[in-house]
Image (tube, rainbow, N blue to C red):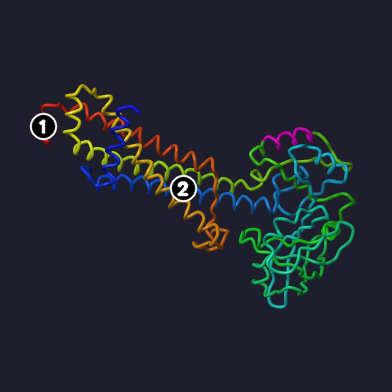
Amino acid sequence: MTLSLFLARRIYRDSDAGKQVSRPAVLIALIGVAIGLAVMIITVSVIVGFKNEVRGKVIGFGADIQITNSDAARSYETRPVVVNDSVISVLSEYPEVKHVQRYSTKPGMVKTAEDFQGMVLKGIGPEFDPAFFREHLVEGELPQFSDTASSNRVVISKALATKLRLKLGDKIDTYYIQDDIRARRLQIVGIYQTNFSEYDNLFLLTDLYLVNRLNNWEPGQVSGAELQVRDYDRLEEITYQIAADLNGIEDKYGEDYCVRNVEELNSQIFSWLSILDVNIWVILILMTGVAGFTMVSGLLIIIIERTSMIGILKSLGANNTTIRKVFLWLSVFLIGKGMLWGNAIGLAFYFLQKWFGIFKLDPETYYMDTVPVSFSILLFLLLNIGTLLASVFMLLGPSFLITRIHPANSMRYE
């Protein structure tokens, strides 16, 4: 063990025992580091959790990648494109694609005896992945919808059911306007709630066959295909690859394919989510500054209190570099202790919120009813390492105060 490390440990033990070291100075340093790191852990876990939650709900309604007609307008009154078994088979052969499913949409209106509401009827087939809607199902069931017959069953959101005063088992009249007005009576067999109001107030799920009949489309024609990818981090690369392979290919009716991912289809939402990254960096910089400056003030007080010791060490032949290392090692010990407190506070918040959902949100504003949290070992380690390195780096300057202390002058501190 080097001399500087040995002396640092001795001073650190004195600070724990309250001997010859200012307890307020040590406590200020520890509390500053603890609060700074705890706030950083909480901030990152909440913002990452919020982004993952919102992204998951957007993807749940529309998948990672959509393949539609290239002439389709940005609306739910779409032009058809052929997505038959052979197309599904080709898309499924991409190793990056986890699942492929067809869908069709038809804008319309739900009318009751007392009220009416615009909506989009989304038709899904037997290959539809029900995991997302099953997770958010609050009443009834999510049936196996068909592409060969209409069951006249529908799954609606709790927001629509509440607004139109509907309940499970009710039959609703829906109307669709083309050359003339067409009507369908559907029975509610399931109610879901995602708290994502922009979609909850819009989508009803039913058979793919029914929507295709309402659109008067030929066999094999649908609004498009939805693809789930295995690695979301490679979304742009996968989108480009599929788009390049389908470029110039027409279906049997002469329609071109258009490939877009969820971030392109929902650019406003994802731009909003990207702004949250700026908030993370602002908070990280502020909290790192808080931790660093409290450590600077604590270290300066300790150096002043240990002036006589510094003078004795210099008179015995110790150079400035060795003595600076003593106090930098002491800072590392104090920062480490403060980080243990900060980690305990931050992780306690994460687990309490994850298991019990203590902090609530207004779902009308935030798309969820509790504060979401997400934990990443990598981010957790980076926060700890970054806090330690930044704090020690900020202490390099104040440690030069040691070079200004002379053995002869330090005697007056005895």
In the rendered view, would you say 143 is above or below 309? below
Residue highlighted by disc 1 = 411
Q: Main secondary structure of the magenta part?
A: helix
Residue 287, position as x, y percentages in the image: 38, 44
Picture quadrant where residue 113 is located: bottom right
Residue highlighted by disc 2 = 41
Left or right placement of residue 369 versus residue 194 in this view: left
Pointer 2 or 1: first along the chain = 2
Q: Amino acid at mark 2?
A: Ile
**Camera-nearest label, 2 or 1:** 1
Residue lying at the far left in this picture: please name it: 412
Q: Between residues 188 and 406, which one lies in front from this camera angle?
A: 406
Residue 243, position as x, y percentages in the image: 74, 36
Q: Which residues are magenta?
A: 237-247
Residue 322, position as x, y percentages in the image: 28, 25
Give the spatial CA distance, label 2 vs label 1. 45 Å
The residue at the point 82 percent across, 55 percent down is 125
Quadrant the C terminus occupies: top left
Picture quadrant where residue 14 is located: top left
Quadrant the N terminus occupies: top left
Residue 308, position as x, y percentages in the image: 16, 33
For the residue carrying disc 2, how many other residues have a C-alpha within 10 Å: few (<14), some (14-19), or many (20+)? many
SS of the residue at dot 1?
A: helix
Q: Between residues 401 and 336, which one lies in front from this camera angle?
A: 336
SS of the residue at dot 2?
A: helix
Picture quadrant where residue 335 is located: top left
Residue lying at the far bottom in this picture: please name it: 113
Count of picture labels:
2
Q: Between residues 122 and 374, which one lies in front from this camera angle?
A: 374
Left or right placement of residue 65 versus residue 340 in this view: right
